[in-house]
Image (cartoon, rainbow, N blue to C red):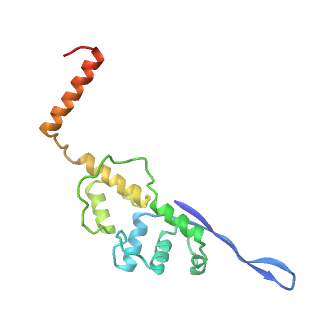
């Protein structure tokens, strides 16, 4: 969850010669989740998770889909500062987990990933529905972990097995100081 503050708008009152607040600052709470992604895809009828550039309008629509704060007028979103946009972009790109993967599973899939595909993965892997509210990157990591843990273990090749045994034997020889 991300909380940002949209800055207030100030003006100068010539009569009193004082700066006055024309629009108050607004605190927004946002969540980059499968639910947000699904709402955005529902509106635009195209996949969100692709390499295509989004228009400013599409980006603003996604911010609206991320909002957890109710009843925010469009005028408040129009006041988002560059720092607000930077903070939102940084938040969307965060990993949000300590899990890392040693290597890539294989060639990158050409499958187009949509909200429905992610929901399918959740159903297939028995990931609880409340996870749809998690940060999207955390959810995708959880799906990958479940998929890898449920897949059958790949057997090591004969070559790798022999190399592993050789390394173990050499370590034992070194530890005990003998020739074998």
- Residue 69: x percent and y percent? 56, 68
Residue most extreme to the front: 179
Residue beneath the point at 16% across and 34% down: 161
For the image, the number of numbered tags is 0
Picture layout, residue 97 above or below residue 51:
above
Residue beneath the point at 14% across and 40% down: 157
Residue most extreme to the bottom: 15
Picture layout, residue 74 above or below residue 2:
below
* Quarter of the figure with the C terminus: top left
In this rendered view, identify the residue nearer to me: 99 or 139.
Answer: 99
- Residue 167: x percent and y percent? 23, 28
In this rendered view, identify the residue nearer to me: 30 or 7.
Answer: 7
In this rendered view, identify the residue nearer to me: 124 or 139.
Answer: 139
- Residue 144: x percent and y percent? 31, 53
- Can residue 94 be seen here? The reply is yes
Quarter location, residue 126 = bottom left
Picture layout, residue 17 above or below residue 152:
below
Residue beneath the point at 33% across and 48% down: 101
Left or right for 119, reference 107: right
Left or right for 140, reference 5: left
Quarter location, residue 48 = bottom left
């Amino acid at each position: 969850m991300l909380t940002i503050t949209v800055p207030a708008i100030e003006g100068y009152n010539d009569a009193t010669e004082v700066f006055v607040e024309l629009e108050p600052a607004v605190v927004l709470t946002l969540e980059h989740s499968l639910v947000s992604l699904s709402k955005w895809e529902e509106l635009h009828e195209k996949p969100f998770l692709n390499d295509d550039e989004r228009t400013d309008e599409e980006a603003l629509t996604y911010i609206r889909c991320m909002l957890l704060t109710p009843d925010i007028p469009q005028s408040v979103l129009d006041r988002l500062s560059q720092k607000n946009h930077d903070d939102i972009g940084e938040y969307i790109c965060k990993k949000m987990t300590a899990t890392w993967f040693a290597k890539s599973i294989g060639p990158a899939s050409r499958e187009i990933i949509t909200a429905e595909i992610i929901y399918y993965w959740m159903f297939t892997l028995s990931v609880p529905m409340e996870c749809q509210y998690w940060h999207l990157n955390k959810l995708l990591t959880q799906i990958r972990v479940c998929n890898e843990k449920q897949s059958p273990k790949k057997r090591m090749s004969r070559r790798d097995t022999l190399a592993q045994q050789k390394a173990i034997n050499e370590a034992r020889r070194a530890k005990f100081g003998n020739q074998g």
